[in-house]
Image (cartoon, helix red, strand yellow):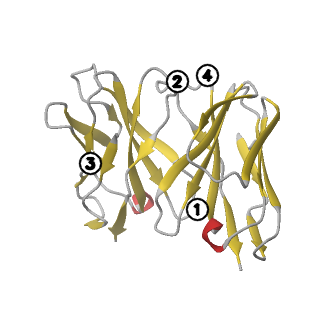
Amino acid sequence: AQTVTQSQPEMSVQEAETVTLSCTYDTSENNYYLFWYKQPPSRQMILVIRQEAYKQQNATENRFSVNFQKAAKSFSLKISDSQLGDTAMYFCAFGTQGGSEKLVFGKGTKLTVNP
Amino acid sequence: DTAVSQTPKYLVTQMGNDKSIKCEQNLGHDTMYWYKQDSKKFLKIMFSYNNKELIINETVPNRFSPKSPDKAHLNLHINSLELGDSAVYFCASSRLGRLQETQYFGPGTRLLVL
């Protein structure tokens, strides 16, 4: 069974600083995708960033970037220049290509950005 | 314009009742999903439909029955509600149900069973 582990239940960072959220996953598959989703207090789930496993280059979206280590099955999210609006739950998710392409989520990390 | 909408936003009901949650997407997507987020924020897929056909059916009690009258709508009916059904239920959609596409989530329906 595929599992996603987020070992940091809560984290905090000062505004304008950088924070890294950890995620590890377990799979025997080769073709898969990894995702980070953000859930602010409004509850809306929003896709932050997506990484295809076959791509060696780390995905980047503005202030958000990932460090994808395929051999170590690690997929961390780096948020640069943290803003108050980044305060949210962050969920790492995994999905295997082929068959039923469903997302498996980690338990989330609650990030608080302090002024 | 809301891309994925759910009604109601909040639902408080007694144990044993039957209730429905409605979901509609105006994105023209073929695939829709239902997720359950428990009190510890753990999010798990329940069902997915592609063009009105059931694709994913996770280990969910038979009391939960999804219904897709057309590809823009996926409703969730729950019979004989139990305390453990209390959760936030999210609807989502994607174009064709492929991982390289973005899943768009609704705002969630908070269900409280008393």
Q: Which residue is mark 1?
A: A42
Which label sits in the foreground, 1 or 3?
Answer: 3
Horizontal and vertical percent for residue B32?
Answer: 67, 35
Q: Which residue is mark 2?
A: B98
Q: Which residue is mark 3?
A: A23
The residue at 72%/55% (across/down) is B63
The residue at 45%/59% (across/down) is A85
Q: Earlier along the polypeptide chain: callout 1 or callout 3?
A: 3
Q: Which residue is mark 4?
A: B96
Residue A7 sits above or below residue B12 on the image: above
The chain letter under disc 3 is A
- Three-letter amino acid code at disc 1? Ser
Residue neighbourhood size for the residue with mark 3, other residues' Cα within 10 Å, grouped as few (<14), some (14–19), many (≥20): many
Q: Secondary structure at mark 4?
A: loop
Q: As drawn, is B76 to the left or to the right of B35?
A: right
Q: Secondary structure at mark 2?
A: loop
- Three-letter amino acid code at disc 2? Arg
Of the 4 image quadrants, the one containing the N terminus of chain A is: top left
CA gap, disc 1 and disc 2: 27 Å
User: Looking at the image, which is closer to me, A79 or B6?
Assistant: B6
Q: Are marks 2 and 3 on the same chain?
A: no
The residue at 27%/19% (across/down) is A54
In terms of image quadrants, where is residue B45? top right
CA gap, disc 4 and disc 2: 6 Å
The chain letter under disc 4 is B
